[in-house]
Image (cartoon, grey):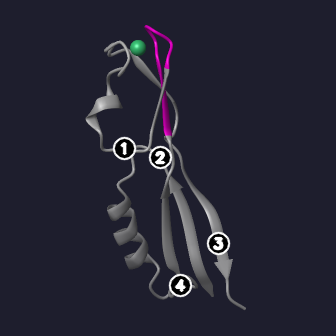
Amino acid sequence: MVSRVRVIFGRGVVPELFRTAFHSYKKGTIADRARLEIKITRVKFRCLRCGKEIKTRDISSPDFSHSCPFCGSKEVELQSGRDLYLEKLELET
Ligand SMILES: [Zn+2]
């Protein structure tokens, strides 16, 4: 049986939606009694105008989403943090 599942999210995933889906899909599977842990990863942007890097954990903040906090430019590029991956799976024997 799976006892614990840890996933890492960046931007673009709503943790509560994932949690709800996880708990409804796990029923009757080997993960039936698994606990779900969610970690939010840092999201990294780069400003195309001033070149500064913007890192944030607050995925709901409007500050970084489309503008640079240093120069105010709206030309920012997402560098990393769009991922969703499974970090850890604990099994009970
Ligand atoms: Zn900038």
Cα gap from disc 4 to disc 1, whole angstroms: 31 Å
Q: Is any atom of residue 93 visible in this view?
A: yes
Q: Nearer the viewer, mark 4 or mark 1?
A: 1
Cα gap from disc 1 to disc 2, whole angstroms: 8 Å
User: Is residue 42 in the magenta section?
Assistant: no
Q: Is any atom of residue 65 visible in this view?
A: no
**Left/right of residue 46 with respect to residue 90 in the rendered view:** left
Q: For the magenta stretch, what is the residue range? A: 43-52
- Secondary structure under the numbered disc 3 in the rendered image: strand
Question: Can you say whether 88 is above or below 10 in the image?
Answer: below
Q: Nearer the viewer, mark 1 or mark 3?
A: 1
Q: Residues within 10 Å of mark 2 (few under 14, many from 20)?
A: many
Query: Which residue in the structure is indicated by mark 1?
Result: 59
Give me the residue at 51% from left, 40% from top: 81
Location of residue 60 (image quadrant): top left
Q: Residues within 10 Å of mark 4 (few under 14, many from 20)?
A: few
Q: Amino acid at mark 1?
A: Ile
